[in-house]
Amino acid sequence: MALVDRLKPMTPKSVLRTIRLVRMRARLSTPASRVPPDFLVLGAQRCGTSSLYKYLGRHPQIAPSLRKEVGYFSASYGEDASWYLAHFPLAIRCQLMQRLGRKLLTFEATPDYLLHPLAPARVQALLPDARFVVLLRDPGERAFSHYLHMQRLGFEARTFEQAIETETETIAADLARIHLDAGHNPKCFHRYSYLARGRYVEQLERWMGCFPRSRFLVLDSAELYSDPDATYQEILRFLSLPMWSPKEFSNHSYVGNATPAAATMEPGLRRHLAELFGEANQGLADFAGRDFPWNR
C-alpha cells in the first residue's frame, strides 16, 4: 500500500480538507492549461470504484483526478467547467509523455454519475470523446451494502425494510428538483436510492442513448475482487494501454482499509430483493447481451 494511503486515515479530516482547498486554489488559476479526462469510471456505488480508482491511478500512463469523486456532472454542476478542469493534469505533462513515445490518460471516478438522470447529456456536452468503465454488483447485495454505509455515516436510522419500502417517497422531491435546478445537489436522492441504483438497465440505456456502446466497458465487480489482475488487464486493453500490474490489489472500500464486520441478509430478505430486481436484472441481461451471476 502506498505511503499516502497509510497516512490518510491517521490525518485529521480538518487537515485533509485544508490541503485539498490549498491544492484546488493553486490549480484554479490554470484551467486553460489542463486537459479534460479521457475516461470516467461511472459507478455503481458500493461496487469497488474506490479500489479501482487506486489501481488505475498507479499505472505509469494514467493520471488520476485530484480527488476521486469530483462530482461535477451530478452534485457540483453549479460550478463552472474551469473548476472541473482544475482537477486534471497540465497539458504539458501529456506533451512530455508524447515526446517519450507514450500517451498519458487521465480520469475520475464518481459513482453518482451512473444514476443521475442528467449526467449523460452533461458529459456529452463537455466530453464528447470520453470512454466509460462501469462496475456492477448483485443489486440486492449492493442495496444492503449501501444501506449499511449510510448507517455508518450517520445518515440512516430506519431499518433496511423501512428504507426500501418508503424509498420512492423519500427521494421524490429531490428527483423532481434535479430537472428544475441545474445546480441542485440531490443529497437525499444520492443517499437513499437503495433500489433505484440497482436498476442498472435504465441507467445504461440512458448513457448509451448519448454515447456509442463501444465506448463502454461493463464489468462485474465480483470479478474485480476474485481476479483483480485479469479485470485490470481487461480495462487496460479497453483503454489501449500497455499491460502493467500494481504491486498489490488492496481493498480501498473503507477508510484505513479496515473493513467493518460483515452483516448478512436474512434468506427471506435476499429472496425479496431478488424478486424486486428480477425484471430489471433480466432487462440488463437482454440489453448487455450477457448473463450476470446474480441473474442465474
Image (cartoon, rainbow, N blue to C red):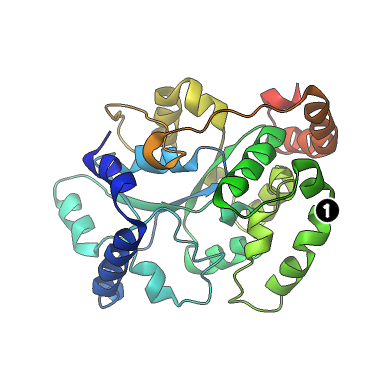
> From where the camera sits, is residue 86 visible?
yes
Q: Locate residue 74: give its quadrant.
A: bottom right
Q: Is residue 60 above or below residue 185?
A: above
- Using a 10 Å C-alpha cutoff, classify the residue at mark 1 as few (fewer than 14 neighbours), some (14 to 19) or many (20 or more): few
Q: Describe residue 162's horizontal placement relative to residue 213 as left or right.
A: right
Q: Position of residue 223 (x, y in %)?
A: 53, 25
Q: Name the residue under label 1.
A: 166
Q: What element carries label 1?
A: loop
The image shows residue 120 at horizontal and vertical percentages of 60, 60
Drawn side of residue 185 relative to residue 271, left or right: left
The image quadrant of residue 82 is bottom left
Residue at left 47%, top 55%? 130
Measured as percent of width and height from the top left, residue 200 is found at 70, 44
Q: Quadrant of residue 251?
A: top left
Side (left or right) of 284 relative to 250: right
Most foreground residue, 161 or 82:
161
Which of 185 and 93 lies nearest the eye of the viewer?
A: 185
Mark 1 belongs to which amino acid? Thr
Q: In which quarter of the image is the N terminus?
A: top left
